[in-house]
Image (tube, rainbow, N blue to C red):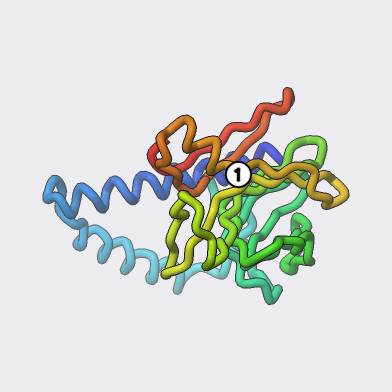
Amino acid sequence: MGDEELLQMIDFVHKRDYSLQTMNQKIEEGEISFPSEQIAKERESGEEKAGKEAPRDRTAKNPEQELTISYTGDLEFQKIAAGQNCIFLAGKSCIHRMEIGSSDSELFFDGFETDTAVTAMYEDKKGNLYLALLERMDENDDSAYSGITLEGVRYKPWLWILNADREVIRKVDVTSLLEQEYGGRTRMITRVVADEQGYIYIRAAFF
């Protein structure tokens, strides 16, 4: 599977999730009714068809088809991103790397300074890995920045860049940048990407 196919699959998943979210919202607002009868018929038809057919290969044949991987590793990953020739999995305060076609992963980086959640990842063609992070703030931190509170704990957003040798080559204080541009309405980054010229683009809630 090539890089372009992986990116198309990821784009398809995001579009699918957005469509489902929009449909659920319309159902809640009463604009459309829940298609319970249609779902029941499709389920009965699928069960009947499954009973007649032999199990099929779940390997994706095209970008629109979902790929199922039985992950056998022990990482409780929270984020996933396609690299140039691998898949990156982010867990609590660590990142794993998984080869294409493999079902297991190996530790790639865990050099974070405190409890850290990875909210987005992107690898460019040079092998640099861009990480959008939420770093746990010190309880005694009395700075003006209130942080992002998750389950009673304050976090601060950062953007780290690792080179191909897994070394941290840059840390960007996203908080100060967003406070200047958006009056302190800081939110965690949900998407990051970099172009060939080195410009970094980020997406987060409310901007």
Residue carrying label 1: 62
Residue 183 visible in the picture: yes
Q: Quadrant of residue 202?
A: top right
Q: Which quadrant is home to the C terminus? A: top left
The relative height of residue 36 versus residue 73 in the rendered view (above or below) is above
Please state the horizontal and vertical placement of residue 176, each as a whole percent of the image: 54, 39
Give the residue drawn at x 75%, y 64%: 110
The relative height of residue 45 versus residue 172 in the rendered view (above or below) is below
Q: Residue furthest left?
A: 30
Q: Residue furthest right?
A: 165
Total of numbered circles in the picture?
A: 1
- Report helix, strand or loop for mark 1: loop
> Left or right: 180 with respect to 114?
left
Please state the horizontal and vertical placement of residue 125, each as a whole percent of the image: 78, 35
Q: Quadrant of residue 59?
A: bottom right
The relative height of residue 152 versus residue 11 in the rendered view (above or below) is below
Q: Residue furthest top?
A: 197
Give the residue drawn at x 57%, y 45%: 9
Give the residue drawn at x 27%, y 61%: 39
> Left or right: 65 with respect to 85?
left
Q: Which of 142/191 is in front?
A: 142
Give the residue drawn at x 57%, y 42%: 174
Please state the horizontal and vertical placement of residue 14, each as a whole percent of the image: 47, 45
Graded by Cα atoms within 10 Å as few (under 14), some (14 to 19) or many (20 or more), the crowding at tag 1 reads few
The relative height of residue 183 versus residue 26 in the rendered view (above or below) is above
Q: Amino acid at mark 1?
A: Asn
Residue 2 visible in the picture: no
Please state the horizontal and vertical placement of residue 119, each as a whole percent of the image: 56, 53
> Left or right: 16 with respect to 89?
left
Q: Which of 16/117 is in front?
A: 117
